[in-house]
Structures are given as structure tokens and as C-alpha cells.
Amino acid sequence: MTSKRDAGSIIKALEDGGVMAECPCCGEPMRLRDAGLFFLDDFTEDAADLYQELKSEQRQRRKELRARRKSIPLDSEVRTTAVNIGNILERLCPALDGFRFQKNDCRSLFDPIDYVIFEGLSEKDKVSRIIFSEIKTGRARLSAKQRQIRDAVEAGKVEFDTYEMGER
């Protein structure tokens, strides 16, 4: 490991020897004695001033970030809570008073549509109609996929298919 004394000797030799280098900022040639070379934290006076200035800027930036973090509204937290409550309510909805379908007629999918309802299945043992139902709370709106499903149903693009496995 290079000692401070060895590093000082190397720096002095580079500066006194008229060694040139390319400036990393502008690409122009420059004398190393004008570069303010230093070893570890044994700064030149200019480097020490610049170092303190950068540390001060960093402290100020940290302070600003802390203030910004505190000033961010709880909006994202409130929104997350609302979404979570909405998901819970979607699952409970068929059991709530006021839900217009028989809970035993409901089959849950949750994605992309919450329920397929086979109206009449549980009480009359006869399906009178099939309903795709999406539960929304607050200002929630149908997603693009849910709108596509709604449009396909409304356009009558619904079929029944049987898939038979194995050989006959």
C-alpha cells in the first residue's frame, strides 16, 4: 500500500516534471501541476474548498428531499387503502343485504370480471339468464379489458363450448 509520503513524492515528481494530461472535462491538454493532484483525503486548498462546497450541497439536497417526502400527500396511501377495501368488498358483495342476485347463483372469477351469475340456478334449479357482473366502489371505472368484455356481451358475441378430453 502506498504511504502518504510516497504519494506526495509521486505527485511532486509529476507536477515538477512538466507532465501533461488531457482534461477530462474539455479534452484540452493541461499541465498536471495545474490539476491540483492530491492523495486520498490530503486535499490541496482548492480541492478542500470544493469538497466542503459539495458536502454542503449534498446536505442541502438531503434536507430538501426530507422536506419533499414529508410534503407528499397521503394520497397514495389513501388510494392503496381504497383499492384494498374495494377488493375485500368485491368478495363480500354477494353476501351483503341489497345485492340483487342470490349469492348461491354467483360464481367468482375476480379477474377480469368479478362474477358470473347463473340467475335462478339455486332456487328454481333452472337458469333463466347468465349475467357477467363487475363490482365497483367509489369512483372506480371499468378497465379497458372489462369494457371489451361488456361490449362483446352486448354485441351478442357469447358462445357455449364443450371440450371433450380423451378418446371415444
Image (cartoon, grey):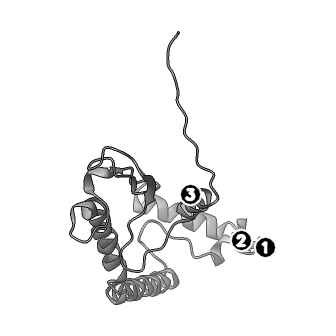
Q: Are marks 1 and 2 in contact (CB under 8 Å)?
A: yes
Q: Point out the frontmost of discs 3 and 1.
A: 3
Mark 1 or mark 2, which has the lower sequence index?
2
Q: Residue at x 48, y 84 (%)?
A: 45
User: Residue at the top extreme?
Assistant: 168
The x, y position of residue 69, in whole percent, is 35, 83
The x, y position of residue 117, in whole percent, is 38, 53
Q: Which mark is residue 28?
A: 1
Foreground residue among 76 and 41 = 76
Cα separation between marks 2 and 3: 63 Å
> For residue 83, which quarter of the picture?
bottom left
Amino acid carrying label 2: it is: Cys
Mark 2 or mark 3, which has the lower sequence index?
2
The x, y position of residue 136, in whole percent, is 39, 70
Q: Secondary structure at mark 3?
A: helix
Q: Which mark is residue 23?
A: 2
Q: Specify whether 148 is left or right of 25.
A: left
Q: Residue at x 43, y 75 (%)?
A: 140
Q: Are marks 3 and 1 in contact (CB under 8 Å)?
A: no
* Residue bearing mark 3: 149
Vertically, is 53 above or below 154? below
Q: Residue at x 65, y 78 (%)?
A: 34
